[in-house]
Image (tube, helix red, strand yellow):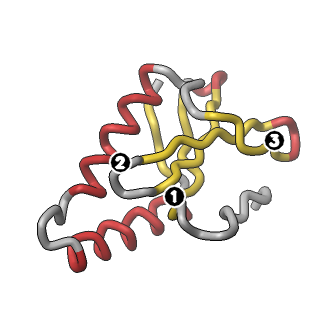
Amino acid sequence: MKTRLAEPAKKQAREMHRWWKKHRQKAPMLFAMELDAVRHRIEEKPNLGVIYAVRRGGIVVRRILMEKTRTHVFYEVMESEQVIMIVALWGATRETGPDLDDE
């Protein structure tokens, strides 16, 4: 299986990467590197993340933490399409989670 980023997740990834490069002088590429590593991990073991929510239609959203950058990756395993869709990237320290309602 391969991972893809939904449009909201792409935007979040770009914003987080830019922020990381600007504010983390000692490790400007850490966010990108950790996201790449977690993508490979969930491609190898799609059910690795914990179940976070079940969306309409029974779609399971899983969550896995990127420990160094303290970012949660929310994703859906789309078995029939052989795709893992990353639907959101969200700071673990935020008080609320992302809006995962169907678009």
Judging by the rendered image, the residue that carries numbered circle 1 is 89
Closest to the observer: 62 or 43? Answer: 62
Measuring from the top left, give residue 3's x and y in whole percent: 45, 37
Q: Residue at x 69, y 67 (%)?
A: 96
Image vertical order of residue 62 relative to residue 66, above or below:
above
Measuring from the top left, give residue 94's x and y in whole percent: 59, 69
**First reached walking from the N terminus: tag 2 or tag 1:** 2
Confirm whether residue 49 shows in the render. Answer: yes
Closest to the observer: 72 or 81? Answer: 72
Using the rendered view, name the quadrant where residue 36 is placed: top left
The number of discs equals 3
Judging by the rendered image, the residue that carries numbered circle 3 is 54
SS at mark 2? helix
Measuring from the top left, give residue 64's x and y in whole percent: 53, 41
Q: Residue at x 14, y 73 (%)?
A: 25
Image vertical order of residue 58 relative to residue 103, above or below:
above
